[in-house]
Image (tube, rainbow, N blue to C red):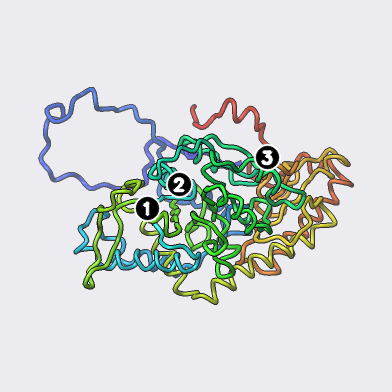
C-alpha cells in the first residue's frame, strides 16, 4: 500500500526555495482583514524529490487509452491521433478570447463554419449548430427545437417516445422540455417493436428519440417504417447519434428520415472521452427546423465571417461563448486528415472489431441478440450466475487482474447481467485476441474456481470495496 503524501511529511522539509522579498513590508492588517487570514493550514512538508516521486507513482496507477484497452460500451473510449492535439494547441486558437469580436476571429469563425458544412454533408442534414457542450446538452437542444417547431405551428403535444434501448439521458432531455416520456418496447431482434410504436404514436406525440445504432449495438432494420409511422402523425424523428462512429461515411441519417441528430465530437471525432469533459454535442437539423437553431449563427458575406442574432424563431443561446472551441478544432483536423474514405474505413473497422469479439466470445457468454452488430456487442453473464453464482460485476473485477479495463456492465438494462463491449476502430487484432483470451479464461475460472473470480481483483492497489457502504457513507478525505 502506498503512503499518503501527509504520511511522508516531516517537519521542516520543503520542496521549494523562495528568495527573500525585496518589497518593503506593509502592516498586513491594514490591507487584509484579520478574519480572512489563516495560520493553521495543515499542508504536508516534503522535499522536492519526495513530492515528484509521490505524484509520478500515483500517475502510473491511472488507466487510460494511452495505457491499455478501454472497451467501455456506448462510450467510445478510443485512442485519438496526437496530431489533433497539436493542432488545437496552435497559438492562434488558444490565445483568442472567446468574446473577441468577429473582425479579430476570422480564422476561428472560418473553421467553425466549415465544420458545420462538413458535418451537414456527412450526416445529410440541412445545417448544424456547434453550441451544445456535450451529448446530453445536444439532446436538450434538439428537443427544444422540436418543441419550438410545434409551438410556432400552434400545436400542443404532450409526450415524446423513447425506446427501451435508448441512452439514459434521453428521458431527462424530454422531461426538461415539458414532455411526458413514454417507453417503446424492443422486439425480439433488439429493434423497435413496430406494433407498439404504431399504438403509441398519436397526434399528441411530439416525436421519437431513437438511438441508432442503439445501446445493444444494433442498427434499426425498420428505420424507413419507423420514420413513416412518426411522420404520418406529424411527429419529428430524433437521432441520438452518440454512436456515429458506427455509420459515418456509410449512411446519412438525413436521408433515412431523421429530422434532428445530435453528435458527440468527443466520442467520434478525436477528443479524449471521459472525466466529464471537454465535450461538444453539435446538433444537425432538417430544412424545416433550421429557423429554430441557436444564435448567434455564423455567416459569410463578401468574404467576411460574421455572427448574427437576427433569427426571430431561434430557441436562443444554449451555451456561454459559442461552445467548446478546442474540441471543434480537433474534430475538424480529424475529418480533414481522414477524408471521406478515411471516415468510411473508420466505421468499417469499428464494426469489424466488434463482430470479431462477438464471434470469439459467443460460445463462452450468453448472446441475447444474435445479429451482426455495429460498433459494440452485448453479452449477458446470466449463465455464469446460474451455474456458479458468479455475477457480471465479479467478471469485471477479475478482468482487472488481466490488465484490462472492464467493459460497461449492467447496461442496457433490458439485458440481465449485461456486458457491453466496444472495441472501437483503433485496436489491433492482437489486442482484441488478448482481451478475448482473458474473457474466456475468466469464463473457465467461473466454472472451475468461482471463489477466485468472486474475490477479485487480486493484483490492484485497492482490493474489492464494499460498494453499498461506499455509496451510502463515502469517505473522501484523509485526517490524522
Work out whether mark 2 precedes mark 1 in sequence or the reverse, and give the earlier one. 2
Determine the CA span between mark 2 and mark 3.
48 Å
Q: Earlier in the sequence, mark 3 or mark 1?
A: 1
Q: Is residue 40 visible?
A: yes
In the image, is 306 to the left or to the right of 58? left
Q: Nearer the viewer, residue 17 or 125?
A: 125
Q: Position of residue 335 (x, y in %)?
A: 47, 70
- Residue appearing at x 66%, y 65% in the figure: 351
The crowd level at tag 1 (other Cα within 10 Å; few <14, some 14-19, many 20+) is many
Kind of element beneath mark 3: loop
Say what secondary structure mark 1 lies in: loop
Name the element at disc 2.
Answer: helix
Q: Which mark is residue 293?
A: 1
Q: Which residue is mark 2?
A: 146
Residue at image mark 3: 463
> Is label 2 or label 1 in front?
2
**Mark drawn on residue 130:** none
Amino acid at each position: 500500500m502506498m503512503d499518503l503524501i501527509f504520511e511522508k511529511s516531516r517537519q521542516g522539509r520543503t520542496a521549494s526555495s523562495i528568495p527573500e522579498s525585496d518589497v518593503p513590508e506593509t502592516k498586513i492588517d491594514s490591507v487584509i482583514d484579520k478574519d480572512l487570514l489563516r495560520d493553521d493550514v495543515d499542508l504536508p512538508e516534503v522535499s522536492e524529490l519526495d513530492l515528484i516521486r509521490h505524484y509520478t507513482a500515483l500517475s502510473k496507477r491511472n488507466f487510460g487509452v494511452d495505457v491499455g484497452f478501454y472497451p467501455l460500451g456506448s462510450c467510445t473510449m478510443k485512442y485519438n491521433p496526437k496530431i489533433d492535439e497539436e493542432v488545437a494547441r496552435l497559438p492562434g486558437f488558444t490565445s483568442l478570447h472567446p468574446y473577441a469580436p468577429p473582425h479579430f476571429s476570422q480564422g476561428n469563425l472560418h473553421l467553425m463554419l466549415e465544420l458545420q458544412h462538413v458535418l451537414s454533408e456527412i450526416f445529410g442534414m440541412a445545417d448544424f449548430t456547434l453550441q451544445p457542450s456535450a451529448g446530453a446538452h445536444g439532446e436538450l437542444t434538439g428537443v427544444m427545437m422540436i418543441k419550438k417547431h410545434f409551438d410556432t405551428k400552434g400545436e400542443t403535444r404532450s409526450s415524446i417516445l423513447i425506446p427501451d434501448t435508448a441512452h439514459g439521458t434521453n428521458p431527462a432531455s424530454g422531461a426538461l422540455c415539458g414532455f411526458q416520456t413514454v417507453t417503446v418496447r424492443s422486439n425480439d431482434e433488439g429493434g423497435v417493436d413496430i406494433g407498439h410504436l404504431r399504438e403509441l404514436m398519436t397526434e399528441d406525440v411530439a416525436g421519437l428519440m431513437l438511438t441508432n445504432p442503439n445501446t445493444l449495438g444494433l442498427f434499426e432494420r425498420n428505420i424507413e417504417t419507423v420514420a413513416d409511422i412518426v411522420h404520418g402523425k406529424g411527429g419529428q424523428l430524433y437521432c441520438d447519434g452518440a454512436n456515429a462512429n458506427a455509420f459515418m461515411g456509410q449512411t446519412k441519417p438525413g436521408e433515412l428520415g431523421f429530422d434532428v441528430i445530435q453528435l458527440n465530437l468527443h466520442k467520434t471525432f478525436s477528443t479524449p472521452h471521459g472525466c466529464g469533459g471537454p465535450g461538444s454535442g453539435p446538433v444537425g437539423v432538417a430544412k424545416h427546423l433550421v429557423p429554430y437553431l441557436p444564435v448567434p449563427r455564423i455567416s459569410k458575406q463578401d468574404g467576411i465571417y460574421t455572427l448574427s442574432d437576427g433569427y426571430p424563431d431561434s430557441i436562443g443561446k444554449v451555451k456561454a461563448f459559442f461552445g467548446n472551441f478546442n474540441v471543434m478544432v480537433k474534430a475538424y483536423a480529424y475529418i480533414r486528415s481522414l477524408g471521406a474514405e478515411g471516415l468510411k474505413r473508420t466505421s468499417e473497422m469499428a464494426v469489424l472489431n466488434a463482430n470479431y469479439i462477438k464471434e470469439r466470445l459467443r460460445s463462452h457468454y450468453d448472446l441475447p441478440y444474435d445479429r451482426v452488430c455495429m460498433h459494440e456487442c452485448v453479452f449477458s453473464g446470466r449463465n455464469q450466475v446460474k451455474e456458479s453464482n458468479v455475477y457480471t460485476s465479479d467478471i469485471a473485477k477479475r478482468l482487472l487482474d488481466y490488465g484490462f479495463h472492464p467493459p460497461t456492465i449492467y447496461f442496457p438494462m433490458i439485458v440481465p447481467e449485461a456486458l457491453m463491449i466496444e472495441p472501437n476502430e483503433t485496436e489491433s487484432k492482437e489486442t482484441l485476441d488478448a482481451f478475448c483470451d482473458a474473457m474466456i479464461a475468466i469464463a473457465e475460472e467461473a466454472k472451475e474456481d468461482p471463489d477466485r473470480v468472486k474475490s477479485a481483483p487480486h493484483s490492484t492497489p485497492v482490493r474489492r470495496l464494499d460498494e453499498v457502504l461506499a455509496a451510502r457513507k463515502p469517505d473522501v478525505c484523509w485526517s490524522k
